Amino acid sequence: MNNEKLKTLIITAVLAALCCVATIVIQIPSPANGYMNLGDAIVLFSAFSLSPIYAAAAAGIGSAMADVLTGYAYYAPGTLIIKALMAITACLIFKKFKATHEFSGLLLSSLAAEAIMVVGYFGYSALLLGNGLSALASIPSNLLQAAVGLTAAVAIYKIMPAKAKSFQAQ
């Protein structure tokens, strides 16, 4: 393994840990048996900074770990997949726009990723957890979480020094 790949792997692990911590530090219970948190900010920042696979690993593993550690283990399988898909989607969209329309890319990629989160958790709760249409109650709190995560991720990315914005292995 070369030094760049090792550096990327270490940064991925750090971002997974940060994602877990950001998810755990502030948890506001929602009426639909989940909770709002700040983890999406790190999910999106990972997508802006890493390649799709590394971003998916950081986002999915970090977020699922938070579910397991805080008593929501039944959400962990869904969280792993949903957050990984969010990261892959945001990463691919952002990379298309980064060179010419960075800010538009940040917003569009974040909106697409957060739409995956809202729809993904609705589907997971409705179908796999057996909550049916009562899972609709989770949508308002997930939309609020999406807005906070998007805003925080864009702010973090914009204030980071240029050298620290991209951790992709060559």
Image (spheres, rainbow, N blue to C red):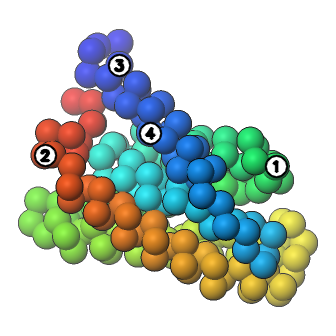
Q: Nearer the viewer, residue 55 or 63?
A: 63
CA separation in Å, label 4 and label 3: 14 Å
Q: Amino acid at mark 3?
A: Leu
CA separation in Å, label 3 and label 2: 21 Å
Q: Quadrant of residue 88?
A: bottom left
Q: Which residue is mark 1?
A: 71
Q: Which residue is mark 2?
A: 162
| Chain-order first, disc 1 or disc 3 | 3
Q: Nearer the observer, disc 4 or disc 3? A: 4
Q: Which residue is mark 4?
A: 15
Asked whether disc 2 touches disc 1, contact meaning CB atoms under 8 Å apart, the reply is no
| Chain-order first, disc 2 or disc 1 | 1
- Give coordinates of residue 12: x percent, y percent: 42, 34
Asked whether disc 4 touches disc 1, contact meaning CB atoms under 8 Å apart, the reply is no
Residue 99 shows in the view = yes
Q: Amino acid at mark 1?
A: Gly
- Give coordinates of residue 89: x percent, y percent: 42, 61
Residue 83 shows in the view = no
Quadrant of image for the C terminus: top left
For residue 154, above or below residue 49: below
Asked whether disc 4 touches disc 3, contact meaning CB atoms under 8 Å apart, the reply is no
Furthest residue toward right: 130
Quadrant of image for the N terminus: top left
Q: Amino acid at mark 4?
A: Leu
CA separation in Å, label 1 and label 3: 32 Å
For residue 93, above or below residue 6: below
Q: Nearer the observer, disc 3 or disc 2? A: 2
Residue 160 in the figure: left or right of residue 27: left
Q: Nearer the observer, disc 1 or disc 3? A: 1
- Look at the numbered disc 3 and give the secondary structure of its residue: helix
